[in-house]
Amino acid sequence: MMKILEHIEKGESQITEFKLSFQKEVIAYVVAFANAQGGKVFIGISDDAKIVGVDIQQESLQNWINQIKLSTTPSVIPDIYIETISNTTVVVIDVKEYPIKPISFKNRYYMRKANSNHLMSMEEIAYEYLKTKNSSWDYYVDTTQSFNDISLEKVSKFMQKIEKTFNRSFDDTPMQVLQKYGLVRDEKITFGAYLLFVKDFCLISGVQAGRFKTSTDIIDSISLNVDLLTEVEELMIFLRKHLMVEYIITGNPQREERYDYPLDAIREVVLNMIVHRDYRDSSDSIIKIFDDRIEFFNPGDLYDGLTVEQLESNNYKSKTRNKLMALMFKECGLIEKYGSGISRIKKLCKEHGIIEPKFEELIHGFKVTLFKEKSNVGVNVGVNVGVNVGVNVGVNVGVNSIYEFIQKHQPVRTTMIAQHFTSVTQRTIERWIKQLKDEKKIEFRGSSRTGGYFVK
């Protein structure tokens, strides 16, 4: 009795609905709960949670059950029972989450979201169907692409990555590996195989990244439509190129480098973008690097009704939109553990001494923002931490530093060097670059727009 009262006092919610009487619309609420996490429909309660009661006979309950059973596909049979609260009769329709989804009522599919019913889209219906089969979109055959569109050489490199990471060897050919991992079905490639090993231009994997001085002034940019493993590598190169780095002299022979953002956190965000993206959405993923923050935007809603609150509290059951791609990334060592990305990103930012990242659900998209701003608690760089212990942080600016910077971050453009060595004039940087070129220590490769300096 107390639990029922507590339930009612909390009002309508993700798992609670109030109705004054049993009408056909009640069946829509039953379906919505069955397609979500389950819930209870209280008959005899007003919208404002007042206990009004309902006149009921025992045979009426069986009639309700029959109506619900005959009006739903597949048939749903909920538990229905009577509760007496202060001499007032209330009927409870207790709906469990249904194992076979989605359920329909009059050929319409509803799902409970927050405190109301949501009419499911065709995409959501398809996803629920795939989840029931314990499958995902990337396991399905791509009818518009063929083996001519993927590179077996890239499959071989993928195999080598697994061998190197886990110290194991393959006796199989690249084609056999594709078949064993389910990347090929009925002698046709899957969407997963296409995204992972596309030979050239990929229609559905577009990523745009840019370095912004203002909201509209772009200093540098990159556009990628390649296979997913290459995208991770290229994006990390581009992001690292536009980060500030401090050289920390600790007394050890090798100087330590410290970027203004934790590289592992950036890599975790990029991996999550690539693996969990909704590739059926025609929009590109977008990364924007500003002076004080980096924004990562992915098209597609959070999967399976997940909320930002659940993500940040780590109070959720990890489910994967693209199971095949997640498996492949895990196989080659890029992903260590499913469902740990958000908490790992927050932990890395805290350890690095910057403020907590921001996670936002937007209209048909999800955004993560990393901030450069230092937190009050964290790593205090550039201060004495003891009588005999000190951390001397700074950039030993000179031609050798320029050379080491290029060696570490190649390809490097002059603008990138100027952004890093802020205490040095543009003319001095150009003079040092000319000196290194004359000494044949560096060379410029590529076009004037996209190329950069490399160590020879």
Image: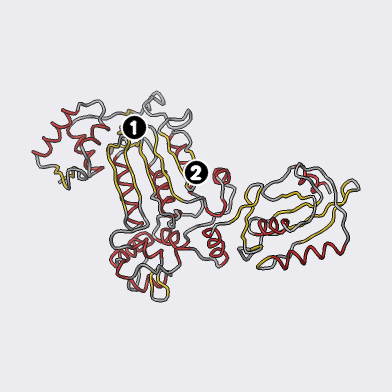
Rendered residue at 53%/63% (across/down)? 126
Which quadrant of the figure has residue 24?
bottom right
Q: Residues within 10 Å of mark 1 (few under 14, many from 20)?
A: few
Depth check: give the residue in front, 138 or 121. 121
Image coords of residue 433 (percent x, y): 15, 35
Q: Which residue occupies the extreme right position in the image?
A: 87
Position of residue 338 in the picture relative to residue 96 (left or right): left
The correct choice, above or below, for 339 with respect to 287 in the image is below
Residue 205 — which label? none
Of helix, strand and loop, which one carries label 2?
strand
Q: Is residue 255 left or right of residue 118?
A: left
Q: Is residue 113 left or right of residue 4?
A: left
Instruction: Please report contact status of discs 2 and 1: CB closer than 8 Å, yes or no.
Output: no
| Mark 2 lies on residue | 362
How far apart are the two marked residues, 2 and 1, measured between alpha carbons? Answer: 22 Å
Outermost residue on the left side: it is 438
In the picture, the disc for residue 214 is: 1
Q: How many marks?
A: 2
